[in-house]
Image (spheres, rainbow, N blue to C red):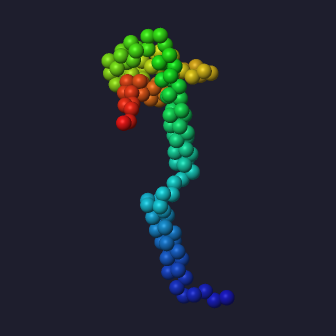
Amino acid sequence: MEMPKNISTLIWSAVGGAVLSMAVGFTWGGWVTGGTARKDSAAAAHDAVVVALAPICVDRFKRQDDAATKITELGKASTWDRGNVIAKSGFATMPGAKDADSDVARACAEILANPATPKT
């Protein structure tokens, strides 16, 4: 079997094409590594849990006897501290959990402090 004379040119062209395709794929093609994919999926799952649990926290908070007063007090708290107020109240601690999820507490406080206006 006879090798072509320009084999090194062919090999370097193949290597260059592979590097170029990887650069384009990772930059503009949306390719990600396995670690990035796992990290992104874990973040998306946590965000979905927060979206699901925040309304439960809001409902539990609104069911207390002096809810209107507590909501007014929550509105007076700084935006940075509202999540802590909800976490300390215990309404962001879900059954079976030992501690409140800080993201759920922040989302709950945001919903309570900024109620949605009805669409007309």
Q: Which of 36 and 81 is in front in this view?
A: 81
The answer to whether any part of residue 94 appears in the image is yes
Indicate the position of residue 20 as horizontal and vertical percent values. Answer: 46, 68
User: Is residue 56 shown above or below 5?
Assistant: above
Q: In this view, does 21 lie above or below 36?
A: below
Q: Can residue 102 be seen in this view?
A: no
Residue closer to the observer: 116 or 6: 116
Please tell me which residue is depicted at 52% across the width and 41% down the height of the picture. Answer: 44
State the residue lying farthest toward the top: 65
Q: Is residue 47 left or right of residue 112?
A: right
Outermost residue to the right = 1
Residue at 53% from the left image edge and 29% from the top image edge: 53
Give me the residue at 42% from left, 20% from top: 84
The quadrant of the rendering that contains the N terminus is: bottom right
Name the spot of residue 26 as percent of width and height, x first.
47, 59
Measured as percent of width and height from the top left, residue 12 is found at: 50, 75
Residue beneath the point at 63% across and 89% down: 2
Res. 120 image quadrant: top left
Residue 46 vs residue 35, the one in the foreground? 46
Q: In which quarter of the image is residue 68?
A: top left
